[in-house]
Image (cartoon, rainbow, N blue to C red):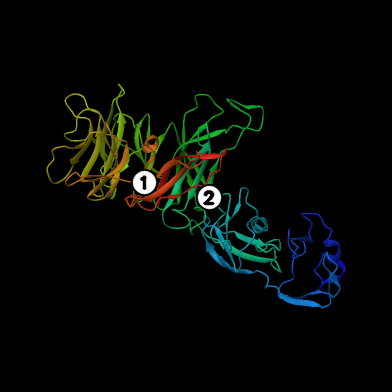
Amino acid sequence: MASRFHVDPPLPGCNLQSAFGAAAGAPCRVSWVPGSSAFVLEHRGAVFLPSTKYTFRIDAGVRDPAGAENSLDHHWDVTSAPAPQVLATTPGDGATDVPVDSPVVISFNDLMDGQATAAAIHLSPPVPGTRVVANRRDHGRFLVLPGRLLDPATAYTVTIGTGARNEHLQPIQKEAQVRFRTGGLSRGEHALVLAGRRGEAASVVLLTGLGALADGEPAPATTVLSAPRCPAASCGAVSRGAPETAYLEASASPDGRRLAVVEHDETVPGAPPDLHIVDLAGGPDTDVMRGASHPGWSPDGRWLAFGTAQGVHLLDPVADVDRVLPPGDPLAGQPAWSGDGSVLALPVRAVDGTLHVDLADPALGIRYPVPRLGGAASAPALDHDGSELAVHRDGGAGVAEGGWLLRLRGGDPTPRRLGPGITPVAYADPSTLLAVDRATGDTPALVRIGVGAGEVTRLGTGPAASDLDTIAAATSGGEIAFLLADDVGVTQAYIENADGSNPAPLTSFGPGGLEALAVSFAG
C-alpha cells in the first residue's frame, strides 16, 4: 500500500512511504482505523501550502488481506485554504496620540492557535511584564497588555511574526507590523486596584478599564507602580524576595492624570508613611509629605485632602498651595466629598478612640461639628450638593445604633434613622443611598435605600459578607467595585452597576500570585 499512495505536489517534510511505519506523534504518519479498511494521514508537521490544489492518488494493485486485488486507480483533489492574515488592529498602523494605558487589539481573519500566535506577537521597545492574551470566545482576537504604562510621546511597534498560525497549523505568510506613537492617558473612568501576594501588604498598583473590551477577554489592566523586591539575604527589616515598599492607600484624581499614594518603607522598622503624587501621564513622582495618610481628591481634581498630625490638609498640587483646616481630631479614614465639592465630611478619631464626623467648607477653609449629631459616628456619605449627610451611629448615650440621615440644608433638620445595622457607602443618585446592611438575624448584604420613604432593597450580587468593607462607588454613583474570591479562591476586583446588574471582573490573577487587596475608582 505504501508504494501506491501518492500526493502531488508532495507535502514538504512528509515521505508518504515512510509515513505508514511512523510512530504516533511523528510529523507525518499514516494510521489505520481499527476494524476498518480506512486509513488516516496525519500531517501536523507537514501542513499544506496555502491556496494550493493537491491530488491524492492510490494506484491499482492494492490487495486486501484475502488477496483480492483492486485493479482501478483512484484519485481525488483537495484545495487548501488561504493563509491566515491580520484583518485589523487597534490602534491602526501609523496611529498617533495613542493612550499610554491602551491595549493593542489584533484581529485575524481566521481562528488561530492561541498559544503559538500569542508567542509570535511582540511589543518593541519591550516592556517587562507585557502579556499577549487570546480571547476565549473569539479565537481570532488577541490583546497585547503592556506590563506598565507606556511612555508618552514614544514610538512603539507591535510585530506579528510568522509563528502565528491558525487552528489548522497554517502560519501567516509574512510578518506584519503595527507602528504607533503614544500620547497621554486615556480619558474616562478607570478603576484603581492595590494588589499583593497572599500574606503581604500591597506591592502593586494597577489601573484598569471598567470591564473587558469584548466578551471572552480580561479587562485591560496596566501596572502603574510595582515595589522592588529584596535581592539580598536581607534588606533592613525585610528578607529576600519580600517587597521593599508597601502601598498602603491610593487615590486617583477624577481626570485620571494623577495618583496620590501612601507608601511605607518596609526596610525601616517604624518608618512613617510617605504621601506621593505620581503623574500618570509620564510626569514626575512628587514626595508630598511624610506622616500623611487618607488621601482623597475633590470631584474637580483640584484639591487633595489628606491628614497629618498637624491636621487636615487641602493641597492644590498644580498651584503648590497647601491649606490646613482649623485644628480638630485627626483623620481616621478617607474624607468624603459632596459631588459638587462644596462640603467635605471628615471621619475622625478622638483622643479616647471614639470615631465621629466633622464637616468642612473647602472654599471658606472652615471646619465644624455636624449639627444635631452627637455621639460616635462613622462612614459619612454626602449627596451631590452637600445638602444631605448619611452616617453610621454606633449607639450609646440614648442613640440607637444604625444608619442615620441628616438634612444639612433645607427640609427637616431632625436626624432620621434609616434602620439598624445600616452603614452608608455612597449616594447612587439624589434619592438612593447605597449601604451595607448588617441587621441582626439576616445575612449581611449590599442594599439600596430610598432616602425619601426609607425602603430597603437587597442587591442580588456583590461582595461576600466578609468583603462588604471593600465596596467603592464611582463618582457618578452609577457603578460600584468590590473584592470577591473567584472559583479557585483567588481574591479579584469586580465591578457592577449600582443596581446590582452586569457584574464583571476587573482583574484576572492566577493562583499563587497576586491578589486584589483594595479597589477604588479613578476618573
Instruction: Evaluate whether residue 317 shows in this view.
Output: no
Please name the residue shown 22% across and 30% down the image.
Answer: 401
Please name the residue shown 67% across and 57% down the image.
Answer: 116
Q: How many other residues sit within 10 Å of disc 2, few (<14), some (14-19) or many (≥20)?
A: many
Please name the residue shown 37% across and 29% down the image.
Answer: 309
Q: How many other residues sit within 10 Å of disc 1, few (<14), some (14-19) or many (≥20)?
A: some
Is 447 positioned to the left or the right of 272 in the image?
Answer: left
- Counting labels gives 2
Confirm or deny contact between disc 2 and disc 1 (CB under 8 A). no
Please name the residue shown 71% across and 72% down the image.
Answer: 50
Quarter the N terminus occupies: bottom right
The relative height of residue 454 versus residue 167 in the rendered view (above or below) is above
Disc 2 residue type? Thr
Which of the pair 506/518 is nearer the observer?
Answer: 506
| Residue where numbered disc 1 is placed | 461
Closer to the chain start, of discs 2 and 1, is 2
Q: Quadrant of residue 251?
A: top left
Which percent across, then down, holds residue 465? 37, 36
Q: Secondary structure at mark 1?
A: loop
Disc 1 residue type? Thr
Which percent across, then down, holds residue 211? 45, 54
Which percent across, then down, holds residue 408? 18, 42
Residue 239 numbered tag: none
The relative height of residue 366 versus residue 298 in the rendered view (above or below) is above
Mark 2 to mark 1: distance in Å? Answer: 26 Å
Q: Quadrant of residue 120?
A: bottom right
| Residue where numbered disc 2 is placed | 222
Q: Quadrant of residue 67?
A: bottom right
Which of the pair 186/422 is nearer the observer?
Answer: 422
Which of the pair 504/264 is nearer the observer?
Answer: 504
Q: Looking at this view, name the residue that lies furthest to the left.
A: 412
Instruction: Choose mark 2 or mark 1, whichever is in front.
Output: 1
